[in-house]
Image (spheres, rainbow, N blue to C red):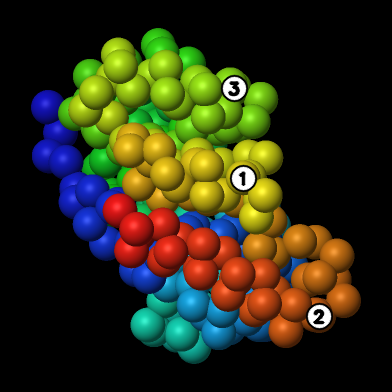
C-alpha cells in the first residue's frame, strides 16, 4: 500500500468552498483569485484546461501566498507531477483509475479523485482514500445520491461538484458526508471575460456567508 498524503479536509482554508479558476493567462488567474479572496474564499482549484494553467498556479502562489491553491482536471501522472512542480498544494481529478490514483498518491499531495459510481468509490477505498470528488453531482443523483451513499460508504466524505450554485449550496453543505463543495458558479465565464471582479467578490461573499451560517448553526 502506498503511503497516503494528508486529507484535503485537513488543509482546506476558509469556508467549505472550493471554487474553480479557469484562466487563459497567469495575470487573469491572479485577478480571479484576488476577487475570490476578497469575498472570503481561502482555497481555489485551478483546472488544467488551458495552456497557461500551470503558470497560473505558480503565479497565484506567488501573488497570493495566503491562498491554498490546487490543480484540477488532473488526468495523468504527467499532470500530477507537473502540477506539483508548478506549486500546486493539492490535486483534484474528474475520474479514478488505478494508474491515476497511484500517480496522485505518489506526489504526496492531498488529493480528491473523481467518482460517480459505487464501484469508483470502492476503488478509491481500496487505495485507502476516504475523500473523493462526486462529479458531475447533478447528473449523478445529486443530494439524494449522496444520502444513499452515506449508508453504504460510511467512512467516505465527498466534494460534490457540478450543477451547484447559490440556490442549492446550503443543501449540499448540510449533508454530513460533504466536507467541501466545489464548482464554477463563483467564477462565471461571462464575468471573467468582462473582468467583472467585483461581481465575483460579491458572489463569493454571499456563498461564504451561507457556509459560515451553516457551520455556526451546527
Q: Residues within 10 Å of mark 2 (few under 14, many from 20)?
A: some
Are the residues flagged by discs 3 and 2 in contact, CB closer than 8 Å?
no
Left or right of 45 on screen, residue 14 = left
Does residue 178 appear in this view? yes
Secondary structure, mark 3, is loop
Q: Is residue 163 left or right of residue 62?
A: right
Could you tell me which residue is drawn at 43 percent across and 64 percent down? 213
User: Alpha-carbon neighbours of circle 1 within 10 Å: few (<14), some, or many (≥20)?
Assistant: few
Sooner in the amino-acid sequence: mark 1 or mark 2? 1
Identify the residue shown where x is 40% and y is 11%.
119
Q: Determine the CA span between mark 1 and mark 2.
A: 26 Å
Comparing 9 with 145, the one in front is 145
- Residue at the disc numbered 3: 140
Task: Tell me which numbered mark, 3 or 2, is placed earlier along the sequence.
Answer: 3
Q: Position of residue 179 (x, y in %)?
A: 35, 46
Q: Quadrant of residue 201?
A: bottom right
Q: Earlier in the sequence, mark 1 or mark 3?
A: 3
Query: Mark on residue 108?
Result: none
Could you say where residue 83 lies in the image, as x and y percent from the top left? Answer: 44, 58
Give the residue at mark 2: 195
Check disc 2 and report its element: helix, strand or loop.
loop
How far from the left and from the top, in percent, is residue 93? 48, 40
Q: Marks 1 and 3: which is nearer the front?
A: 1
- Please report the residue visible at 19 percent of the width from the left and 51 percent of the height from the top: 6
User: Above or below — where is 213 with respect to 93?
Assistant: below
Residue 168: which disc?
1
- Tell me how far mark 3 sits from mark 2, CA to CA: 33 Å
Amino acid at each position: 500500500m502506498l503511503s497516503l498524503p494528508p486529507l484535503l479536509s485537513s488543509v482546506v482554508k476558509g469556508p467549505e468552498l472550493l471554487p474553480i479558476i479557469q484562466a487563459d493567462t497567469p495575470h487573469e488567474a491572479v485577478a480571479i483569485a484576488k476577487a475570490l479572496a476578497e469575498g472570503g474564499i481561502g482555497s481555489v482549484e485551478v483546472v488544467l484546461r488551458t495552456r497557461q494553467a500551470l503558470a497560473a498556479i505558480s503565479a497565484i502562489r506567488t501573488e497570493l501566498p495566503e491562498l491554498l491553491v490546487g490543480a484540477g482536471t488532473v488526468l495523468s501522472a504527467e499532470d500530477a507531477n507537473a502540477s506539483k512542480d508548478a506549486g500546486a498544494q493539492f490535486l483534484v481529478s474528474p475520474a479514478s483509475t488505478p494508474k491515476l490514483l497511484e500517480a496522485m498518491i505518489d506526489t504526496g499531495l492531498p488529493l480528491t479523485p473523481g467518482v460517480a459510481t459505487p464501484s469508483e468509490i470502492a476503488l478509491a477505498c481500496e487505495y485507502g482514500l476516504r475523500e473523493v470528488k462526486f462529479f458531475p453531482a447533478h447528473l449523478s443523483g445529486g443530494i439524494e445520491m449522496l444520502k444513499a451513499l452515506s449508508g453504504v460508504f460510511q467512512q467516505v466524505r465527498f466534494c460534490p461538484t457540478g450543477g451547484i450554485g447559490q440556490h442549492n449550496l446550503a443543501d449540499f453543505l448540510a449533508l454530513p458526508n460533504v466536507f467541501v463543495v466545489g464548482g464554477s458558479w463563483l467564477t462565471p465565464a461571462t464575468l471573467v471575460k468582462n473582468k467583472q471582479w467585483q461581481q465575483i467578490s460579491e458572489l463569493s461573499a454571499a456563498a461564504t456567508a451561507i457556509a459560515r451560517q451553516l457551520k455556526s448553526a451546527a
